[in-house]
Amino acid sequence: MINRELIRVKIVQLTYAYYQNGDGNIDKAEKELLFSLSKAYDLYNYLLELIVAITNEERHRVAIAKQRAEREGTEAPSEKFINNKFVLQLEGNKQLTSFLEDKKLTWDNDIEAVRKLCDQIEQSAFYKDYIASDDDSYDADRELWRKIYRTLIQENTDLDAVLEDKSLYWNDDKEIVDTFVIKTIKRFDPANGADQELLPEYKDEEDRDFAVKLFRATILNADTYQHYMSDASRNWDFSRLAYMDVIIMQIAIAEMINFPNIPVNVTINEYVELAKLYSTPKSGRFINGMLDSIARYLNDTGKIFKPMAQRQQPNYREGNDVRDNNRRNFKNNNKEE
């Protein structure tokens, strides 16, 4: 489940924290990185459990409504939602149950957030259509929860606030983790019963190694990577570059040099997007030009051997000038290397 997009986000956060803390303990920082990544997997399981918690609250509501209907002689409420076949399978999932018991994760202390979501679900058009439909197939049940999650849970600021209060590590994780919860919903197969596999914490050991190796390379080779940045930024005062820009470029250079199978354009695009998220409004364009110049220098000097794919040119001339000037200055400044 923990993919390289999430790993890059965490390394940006932890590298920044490493320099802010100032204790220089890389082993401690590495443990913090891995712990932070493990918390993202906690969130994945916790959000799956939210589906069960919502269903349990609805069971409570249906039980009260049935008692009222019996007293008043009115029509009993539908039990279709609380007997949703997908949820019944998720509720009995061995892997989820074991994980939640081990981590002691429960929504019991946030029942108001669960109730608010129940209200929103009951008011939705797709819920009403589901209750009224004669389709009682597993596919229909699973599709309902895919719609609920994408519409009411995926971008829910109130829920985001609840999660942030429970763990600071979850502040930037939910957007990525949401995509994995939706993927899991779609993967559920009734034939698998309680043994349905959830997504693993890491796809394979290679991704965990990627996190550790990239973080260590970023820190241990900081002086060398910042030298590349300084030479590539002769049109600017390197000391006045945004601190987060320096960190993001430092990580990107570490990835270019230490992971030969990752194309340069993939690395640059990933860190340009991170710059847009974590740094200044102009950082994305600036970092794009800087990293392009540095990558070409690293290729020209044999420090990396990666094809430089034709990059899509921006519509403005200034972006081209930045890249062209960076590359000319960078090659001139490093002729002796």
Image (spheres, rainbow, N blue to C red):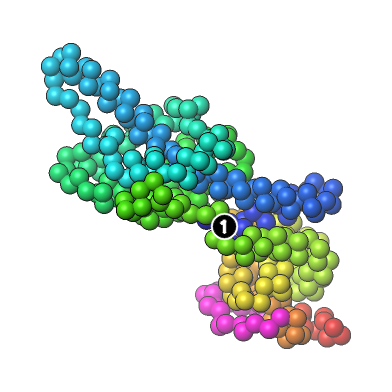
Whether residue 8 is visible here, answered yes or no, is no
Specify the amino acid type for callout 1: Tyr
What residue appears at the point 28 percent right and 40 percent down from the top-left corner? 84
What residue appears at the point 47 percent right and 36 percent down from the top-left corner? 158
Q: Which residue is mark 1?
A: 202
Looking at the rendering, the stretch of residues picked out in magenta corresponds to 304-327
Looking at the picture, how far across and down is residue 192, in whole percent? 36, 52
What residue appears at the point 82 percent right and 81 percent down from the top-left corner? 334
Q: Few, some or many C-alpha atoms within 10 Å of disc 1 (few <14, some 14-19, many ≥20)? A: some
Give the residue at the far right of this rendering.
336
Front in this rendered view, residue 335 or 178: 178
Residue 314 figure quarter: bottom right
What residue appears at the point 55 percent right and 48 percent down from the top-left corner? 41
Looking at the picture, how far across and down is residue 324, in whole percent? 67, 81
- Give SS at disc 1: loop
Residue 73 figure quarter: top left
Image vertical order of residue 230 relative to residue 49, above or below: below
